[in-house]
Image (cartoon, rainbow, N blue to C red):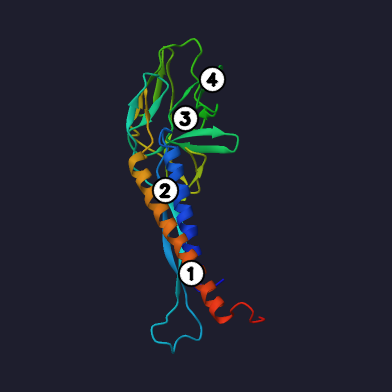
Amino acid sequence: MDITTSLAASRLLAQQRAMDITANNVANASTPGFKTERVVFSDFVDRQAQTASVPGVKGIVYTQDRATYREAQSGAVTRTGNPFDLALGGDGYFTVSTKSGPRLTRDGRFGPRPDGTLANGSGDAVLDVTGKPIRIPQTDTKVTIAGDGTVTTESGQIGKIGVVKPADPMKLRAEGATNFVSDSPTSQVASPGIVQGAVEESNVQPVLEVTRMMDTERQFQFVTQLVQAEGDRQQSAIDKLLPPGSGA
């Protein structure tokens, strides 16, 4: 593969990655607790050997997919009227117990299982500050959840919902649309600002994401046209150097 095509291919791969991330943002614009993802690209300099004596030649710069990160700002809080729906007004994450272990989430669409255990839509139990599931007595009907996570019913205080934050937010790994695995230690948030009867919406801005998608598509088409033009140029040069009937 020639250098021009190699450079273009690195840019096309980067644009495809950007398109995939943007499309995923658009698809999750209505997913509670979802955080917008962004990609970071950098230059990879391939320093060419035997070119030190050639003026102006220092190396070939390729496009490199460096990292993916999430925008941390909170989404809008929407009232639902469901007493088991919870939104976080500040930093931190709820902890749910999955088959693969504890997972962090900002998706507060919760509800009681038949045995009274507070859980998310997948049936994963919501954990308290001690890492244990919260169970609401089946006979209790009035559930109040305070801003600090304290859960109170007719039976009195039955637990306190745990809200944690990782020591290093950059070491959160996504698992699905709203769950995260923390590769760093977590600690309890003192004032999580829980809002009962509400959910935090996605922080995706659909109009902005569609605009990004259109811009990425235009750039992808431009590079594709460059590759096609380079291919035509090379074919034209071959036809001139080796005309039909030359016996080559």
Q: Please name whichever residue, 233 or 24, is drawn nearer the observer in this view of the structure.
A: 233
* Numbered label attached to residue 113: 4
Q: Nearer the viewer, residue 195 or 147?
A: 195
| Relative height, residue 55 to residue 116 (above, below) | below
Q: Could you tell me the amino acid type at mark 3?
A: Asp
Tell me the distance, in whole angstroms, between the alpha carbons under discs 4 and 1.
62 Å
Mark found first going from the N terminus, 2 or 4: 4
Tell me which numbered mark, 4 or 3, is placed earlier along the sequence.
4
Q: Residue furthest front?
A: 245
Q: Are marks 2 and 4 in contact (CB under 8 Å)?
A: no
Closest to the camera, between mark 4 and mark 1, is 1
Q: Earlier in the sequence, mark 2 or mark 1?
A: 2
| Mark identifier at residue 230 | 1
Q: Please, what secondary structure does the residue beneath circle 2 have? A: helix
Which element carries disc 1, helix, strand or loop? helix
Residue 203 lies in what quarter of the image?
Answer: top left
User: Which residue is disc 3 drawn over?
Assistant: 128
Sequence-earlier tag: 4 or 1 = 4
Q: Which is more foreground, mark 2 or mark 1? A: 1
Amino acid type assigned to the residue bearing label 1 in the image? Glu
Q: Is residue 247 left or right of residue 219?
A: right
Q: CA distance from mark 2 to mark 4?
A: 31 Å
Amino acid type at mark 4: Arg
